[in-house]
Amino acid sequence: MLAIRQDFEADSDGLAAIASRSTLVDELVVRLWTAEVAADAALAKGVVLAAIGGYGRSQLFPHSDIDLLFCAEKGEAEYAKGAIRRVTQALWDCGMRVSPMTRKLSECERFQAENAEFGLSLFDRRMLIGDVALFAKLDEKIRGKLMVKDAKTIRMEIASLTRERHAKYGDTLFHLEPNVKDGPGGMRDANICGWLQMLQAGSSSAVGETEEFDEAVAFLAATRCFLHYRHERDDNALDWRAQDAAAEQAVGLGAERRKVGGVDPAYWMRVYFRRGRIVERCMLRQFEAHGLVLAPVELRRVKLAGNQGFRLKDGALMLDPAEGTDPAAEPEIVLGLFAAMAKTGARLGGESELRIAAAIPQLSANLEEGPGLWRRLSEILTGERAGTALRAMHTLGLLELILPEFHGIDALVIRDAYHRYTVDEHTFVLVDTLHGLAVDPGPNAPEWREKLGSMLRELQSPGLLYLAALLHDTGKGRASDDHAAESARMAKSVLARLEMDAYDAALVLRLIEMHLEMSNALRRDIFDADTVRTFASKVQTHEALRMLTLFTYADIDAVHPDALTPWKAENLWRLSMNASNQLDRNVDEERVHTSGRDERIVRFLAMLPGREAEAQRFLEGFPERYLKTRSPEAIRQHFELTTRFEKEPFQIVFQHGAEVSEITLVTQDRPRLFAGMAAALAAWGMNVVTAAGYANEAGVVVDTFRFTDRFRTLELNESERERFVESVRDLVAGRASVEKMLSGRKRSKRRAPRVLVETRIDFDETASSHSTLLQVVAQDVPGLLRAISVTLSAAGHNVEVALVDTEGETAIDVFYLTHDGLRLNEEQEIELHAALLEAIKENAQ
Amino acid sequence: MQKIEAVIQPSKLDAVKDALVELGVLGITIFEVRGHGRQKGHTEFYRGREYAVDLLPKIKLELVVADDMAEKAIQAIISAARTGRIGDGKIFVSKIDEAIRIRNDERGEIAV
C-alpha cells in the first residue's frame, strides 16, 4: 500500500493507484480463500467470491470500502458461513474496510429499489475466486434478468437517487468547496454514465465515453485519491486547504505539467470545474438517451413560432436537421433557441448541444454585434428561466463568444467567508433570484416581498437590470482593488458593441459601478437622515434606485442560501423607501459649480479642448442630478446645441427606441416650455414614462422626456419620425396649436387600471431654500403630465426643476416651483391644490 | 458569572464586536431582531401610500462573562454603541448559575 501511495505521489496517476490497490486486495482475497479451500475442499464448489461496486470496477480508492460478494448456491451459504467470517476477519485485521455481502444466487437476479445501492453495485462485478460455473450463472442472471426485466425500475431509481444527491449540493457543481465524489460532476456522476451505458448495451462493461470524458475521470480519480491520502479517510470534500495543496502538487495535471511545479489554486480549481462540467454533461446526455430528466421542470406554456430552425419536442429544444447550412452555425437561430429555452424552461437536446459545440467557430465568424444581438440577448435575459439558458450557453462557450468579458470569471473561485459559489454561478443564481421575485408570493407574504415583486414587474426596461446583473462581477476576473469599477470599465465595451442607446448604457454602467452601495448603506443606520441622503445622492433617480434595490436583494441572496434573512430583506426595502422619499428633495439645492474638480466635469471639459470656459459656463448651475445621470458625451451634445440657438432657438434631439424613445429639448428658458413639451407629446399620443427638466445659471433649459409610443406611430412609419420632431418643435415654439391637434386626435379607449391609485398632492417648503416642492402622486393615464404642467403654467408658476417618474400604474411627478422668483405662498398652494385635483380628474374622464 | 444582553443599533455591531474582542471576550451570540423602546415607531410615506415603521431593526448580543469582566464589557458596549440619540439601545444584566462546555463537561467560568 505504501508503494502505491509513493507511486501516486510521484506520478499523480489516480487511475493507476486505484487499480493497483484493487489488484493488491484481489491477491489477498484470493490467497485467503485458497487457504480456506485447502482446508475444506467442499468450499471449492457452490461458492464464488466477486468484487462489486467500485472494487468491481478496479477503482478502489485508498480509503474506500471493499465491496465483496460471497455468492452461494442454495444451501451452500450456511455451510460456508465460517470460512466467510474468517476471510472477512482476516481482511479487517489487515486494515481493510471490507463490506462483505453473502447472497444466494436467486437474491441477485432482481433489482430491489429499497436496496438500490446493492443492485447497482452488481453492474460492476468481477470474479475473484471460487466456483467459475456459479459466477457464469450469476453473470447470466444479472445480464439476462436484472438488467433487462428491471431496466425501467433501475433507470427510474438512478434518476431519483441522482436528483436527491444533486439537490444536497444545490444542484450545482460550482461550489467553492465541492465534493469530488457525490457533488454534481463528481465521480458518482461518472459511474452513472457507465451504468446507463451498460443498460443500453446490455453489456457487462461500460462502453467508453469520449476522450475528454476519460481525461475528466482520470483527473477526478487523481483528485479523490489525493483527498483520501490527505484526509486519511474516505473524505471527498475539496476544501480550501486541500485545493492549495492539490494546486501546489499539480494533482491530475499530467507528468509534463508537474515537472514545471505547482500551479495557482484558482487555475487548478478551474481545471477541476471544467472537468466536472464534462462529466455532468455526459451524464445528462446519457439521461436523455434513456428518456430520463434530471431536473423535471414544469414547462411554461409559451407558444413558439414555427420555422425558426428549431423545435420543442418532449420537453427538449432541438435544432432542425442540417440541410445545406447547419442551423447550429446560424447565430440568429441558435440565439433564438436559447431565448425559447429561457422562455419555456425546456432543456437543450443532447444532439443539438453537440452540434452547437462543434459549430462554435462558425458561430464566431457569423456573429453580428449591434442592436440585433442586444435584442436577442435581452430576450434571453428577460425569459423567466434565463438562468437555465445562460448556464447552457456558458457550458458551450457561447456566452463567452458573445461576451468575452465573461471568460475571466469562468469557474472562478474567490475565497471569502460568505460566498458559496464560483463567480459565474453566483451570477446565474442572481439572475434566477431576480426572476423568482416576479412569481406571486401568495397572500401571506411580507410587505417587502410583495413590494419587490411589483417593483420588478413594473420595470420599464428589465433587460437593463439583467444585463447589469450578468456583467456586475466580470471585474473579479482581473487583478483590481475595486471590482465594481473594473466591471463597469469592462461593461463599457460590451455596451458599445451592442450599440445600446446612451441613456440605457449609462444606467447599466451606473448600476454596475454602484452595485455594492446599497449593501454598504445597509451596514449603517438606515433611518439616519445623513445615511439616506448620502445614499440617495449616489443613486440619483428612481429608476436606478428600483433596479439597485432589486439587484442588491438578489446579489445578497445569491451569495449563500442563508445570506438574505427576512430581517435584512426588510431593512433593504426600508432603505429603498427612505431613499426614494429623499431622492427628489435636494435636487434644486445641489447645483453644479465648475470651480469644483468633480471627475465628471473634468471628463466633460476634456472633450472640448480650447472651449473650456464656454463649456464651464454651460454646466454652471445645472442640478447635480443632470451631471450625474447624463454621460459626458450626452452633455457635450447638449452643449453643442446651445451654439445653434441663433439658427433655431428650439434645439431637439430625438432617439427612437424599441421600447422607450427619448426626446430632449435644449433652449433658452421661457414660460410654459415644460408644459408645451408635455402637451406636444400628449397630442401625438405618446405616454411619458420619465421626464426631467433642468435649467442652468444662464437660463439654458434641458428638458428630457422618455416615452412609449402607444400607437406605434414612429415604429411603423419611420418617415414620421422627422415630422414628429418638427411638429413637437412647432408646438413648443407656439408655431402650431396644441389644442387644435388634440381636438383632431381620436381618444383611444382606456383599459381599466389593475391597481387604483388615489391622487395625493403634497407641498414641501423645506426641500429648497428658494422654491416650493410639489409632489403629485396619481393614476398614470395618458395626458396626465400635460394636465398637471398646463395647470402649473396657467397659474403662472415657473417650473425650476421637474422630475417625472412612473412606477407601474402610479405616476410620481415632482416639481420645484417659483412664482415671480419666490416660493409659493399658502394661498397659492391651496389654489393650486384644488386646480390640480380638478385637472387630474378631468383628464382621467 | 453574568449574562449581558445588549440591544444595539445594527450599524454599531462591528464596533461593539471589536471592542469586546479587544477586551478578551471570546464568545458572543448575535441575533437579528426587531422591536421598539421609547424610540417607538413612526410612519413613512412612499409613493402616496402610508407605511407604519413600528418595529425597528436592532441587533441583540448575548454574552456570558466572569463577574470581574462584566463591568468592563458593559462599558465597552456603551462606548462603542452610544451616539447620544434615542434608539441607541439597552443593556440587561443577569446572574448565571452555571456554564457547561458540552465537549468536555468543563463547568464554571472556565467554560465561558
Image: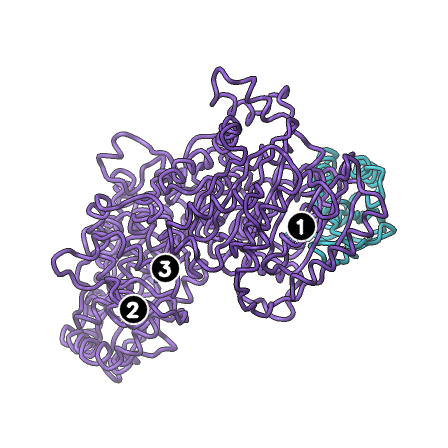
Chain colours: A purple, B cyan
Q: Nearer the viewer, mark 1 or mark 2?
A: 1
Q: Which mark is residue A344?
A: none
Circle 1 crowding by C-alpha within 10 Å: few under 14, some 14–19, many from 20: many
The dot on residue A312 is 2
- Disc 3/disc 1 C-alpha distance (Å): 87 Å
Q: Position of residue A756 (x, y in %)?
A: 66, 66
Is there any visible trace of residue A338 in the rendered image?
yes
Point out the tag, 3 or 2, that comes first from the N-terminus. 3
Both on one chain, marks 1 and 2? yes
Write the residue at 19% across / 67% down: A127
The residue singled out by tag 1 in the image is A790
Q: Is residue A640 left or right of residue A738?
A: left
Q: Quadrant of the C terminus of chain A?
A: bottom right
**First reached walking from the N terminus: tag 3 or tag 1:** 3
> Who's the residue at 24% across and 78% down the image?
A146
**Which three-letter amino acid code belongs to the residue tagged 2?**
Leu
Q: Which residue is mark 3?
A: A97
Left or right, A137 with respect to A220, comes to: left
Mark 1 residue element: helix
Percent of width and height locating residue A555 = 53, 49
Report the front residue among B110 and B28. B28
Q: Quadrant of residue A328?
A: bottom left
Q: Name the element at disc 3.
A: loop
Q: Amino acid at mark 1?
A: Val
Tell which tag, 3 or 1, sits nearer the viewer. Answer: 1
